[in-house]
Amino acid sequence: MKDVKISIKNLNLYYGTKQALKNISLNIPSKQVTAFIGPSGCGKSTFLRTLNRMNDLIDSVNITGEVLIDGIDIYDKSLDVVNLRKRVGMVFQKSNLFPKSVFENLVFGLRLNGIRDKNILLETAETTCKQAAIWDEVKDRLNEPALSLSGGQQQRLCIARALAVKPEILLMDEPASALDPISTAKIEELIHDLKTKYTIVIVTHNMQQAARVSDLTAFFYIGELIEYDKTTKIFTNPSFKQTEDYVTGRFG
């Protein structure tokens, strides 16, 4: 495997007494796309959120095991969670834009970090919009409400906003599930382009999408990691019958 960016060892997660993730261990390589697949409720989104400690926000969650990013345990009590979330950006299923202008959405993270210089803000807005393949569509609309954009544009704006604080890792939780086929194709193309600079982890319920965009695929079932391998192997020659049944559409 290429350079390991994220290493997960014996991870368990409980909501109160209910165990949602069971003893998960895997390594996620740098600057590749890793997809998590599996039926609804199997734990893939919960697992994704352990990678930037989003589950900390839920009461009654208890986590054991290790999540190492560049060899550092992100669950260490001394770790700065705000800094972690700068390094590990997140894009959700539904675009979660603020009721502000396109520009203010783009620079929100920078302003939060105390950056006020107008030139830096403008330059970052342009750079990240170009990275997210949306600059040509919004460059004349920066002062318009972000919520006036189409669904596909809003989602690419969310990606641009996540890139503005210069993360190393981008987590995507079903980023195209609410979009039409043309917008979905743009998001997939974007993921392909972004992996040259970022480590990308995507949760998707769309198996064709996982096959198209990812280098590695992990199949989850009822809180367990059943199989993790190169995407081509998972989809053409999986090692476990459960994986084969899922990817061929026999269940899920």
Image (cartoon, helix red, strand yellow):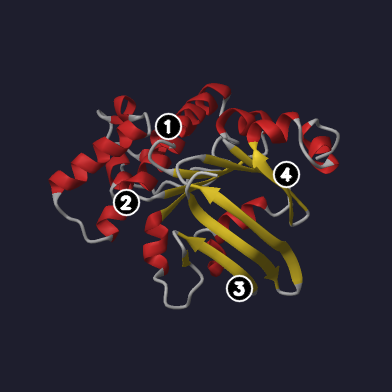
Residue 12 location, quadrant: bottom right
Residue 214 location, quadrant: top right
Q: Of marks 4 and 3, which one's residue comes earlier in the chain?
A: 4
Give the secondary structure at mark 1: helix
Please say if 162 is above or below 129.
below
Q: Badge 2 is on which residue? A: 165
CA gap, disc 4 and disc 2: 31 Å
Instruction: Name the quadrant of the N terminus.
Output: top right
- Whether tag 1 and tag 2 are in contact, CB under 8 A, the answer is no
- Whether tag 4 and tag 3 are in contact, CB under 8 A, the answer is no
The foreground one among 71 and 44 is 71
Q: Badge 1 is on which residue? A: 153
Instruction: Name the quadrant of the C terminus.
Output: top right
Q: Amino acid at mark 1?
A: Gln
Q: Nearer the viewer, mark 1 or mark 4?
A: 4
Q: Amino acid at mark 4?
A: Gly
Q: Of marks 3 and 1, which one's residue comes earlier in the chain?
A: 3
- Whether tag 3 and tag 1 are in contact, CB under 8 A, the answer is no
Q: Of marks 1 and 4, which one's residue comes earlier in the chain?
A: 4
Disc number for residue 86: none
Q: Badge 4 is on which residue? A: 38
Give the secondary structure at mark 3: loop
Q: Of marks 4 and 2, which one's residue comes earlier in the chain?
A: 4
Position of residue 202 measured from the top left corner of the image (x, y, whole percent): 56, 43
CA gap, disc 1 and disc 2: 20 Å
Q: Nearer the viewer, mark 4 or mark 3?
A: 4
Q: Badge 3 is on which residue? A: 59
Q: Residues within 10 Å of mark 4 (few under 14, many from 20)?
A: many
Q: Amino acid at mark 3?
A: Asp
